[in-house]
Amino acid sequence: MNHWYLNPDFAHGPAATLFANLEQVFSLEGEPITHDLISRVLRVSVDGRRYYVKRYTGSGKGKSAVRRWFGLRRWFGLQRVRAEWQNLETFRSWGIPTATLVAYGLERRLGRFTRGALITEEIHDTLNLAEMAHAGDPRLRDRQWLAQVLHQVATIARTLHDAGFAHNDLKWRNLLVDGAAVPTVYLIDCPSGSFYRGAVLGYRITKDLACLDKLAKTQLSRSQRLRFYLDYAQQQRLTAADRQRIRRIVAFFAGRD
């Protein structure tokens, strides 16, 4: 069984042919960007536009021997590709800027996931915050620019968490910023994000904030980090509960760096 969706906005022109179906997408060649055990990302260009093609397969070698032994790799792959396109759609419905979904879908045989893919349009004139940090981008030293960006990041994180959702990889590399005078922050790449409840949600929220702080502590002052947290929490000053959470955030990756 195949399921394939093509965004109607891209139903005409070269992109429609390029991303017409799953078979066509898996035959594409392009610039390799990243890969892991179950997915590969290519960048392809057509008609003056660039697209990111992420392809998932139901197999994998290496550290996932237990999953393969019990046949769970095929279900694991299915969850990630479907979750990724659904999460991007959810972000857009919440008003969070994100990449435009061009096409997505999956293939199943005898009820088992075999492969899947999603294609997003490149967001023009953007860099991720991690790239900017590693390159020493001067905008990170511009207080006004940085305050605008951090406010948007705080709003994005709060929107996710207020809905009971955790990104699970909320790192600077997954936050794109455009080159406009008034910058816009885009949230991308969320195959492992999900909804949680209770103590599990609390733990996942701490993890998200710790992921953000992991690079922030090397780029921001303590007062900037504090202002970010207060903005996220929508408070003027810290409470006892806030101080406890901040201690958990700071200690989250201790000994794991």
Image (cartoon, rainbow, N blue to C red):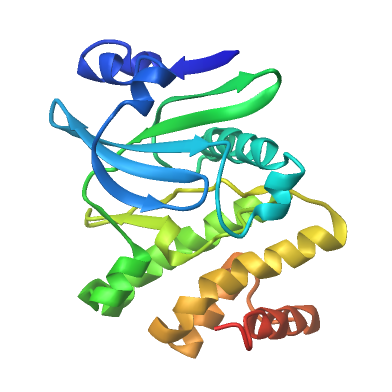
**Front position in the image: 176 or 6:** 6
Residue furthest to the top? 12
Residue furthest to the right? 198
Q: Position of residue 128 (x, y in %)?
A: 34, 60
**Front position in the image: 52 or 176:** 52
Q: Position of residue 256 (x, y in %)?
A: 60, 83
Residue 245 falls left or right of residue 5: right
Q: Quadrant of the C terminus?
A: bottom right
**Front position in the image: 171 or 69:** 69
Would residue 234 be seen by someone viewing this image from the given angle?
A: no
**Front position in the image: 95 or 69:** 69
Q: Quadrant of residue 210?
A: bottom right
Give me the residue at 47% from left, 48% from top. Answer: 189
Residue 29 falls left or right of residue 236: left
Give me the residue at 78% from left, 64% from top. Answer: 202
Would residue 248 be seen by someone viewing this image from the given angle?
A: yes
Give me the residue at 29% from left, 43% from top. Answer: 123
**Count of marks placed on residues:** 0
Q: Position of residue 198 (x, y in %)?
A: 86, 57
* Location of residue 206 with respect to 253 vertically, above or below: above
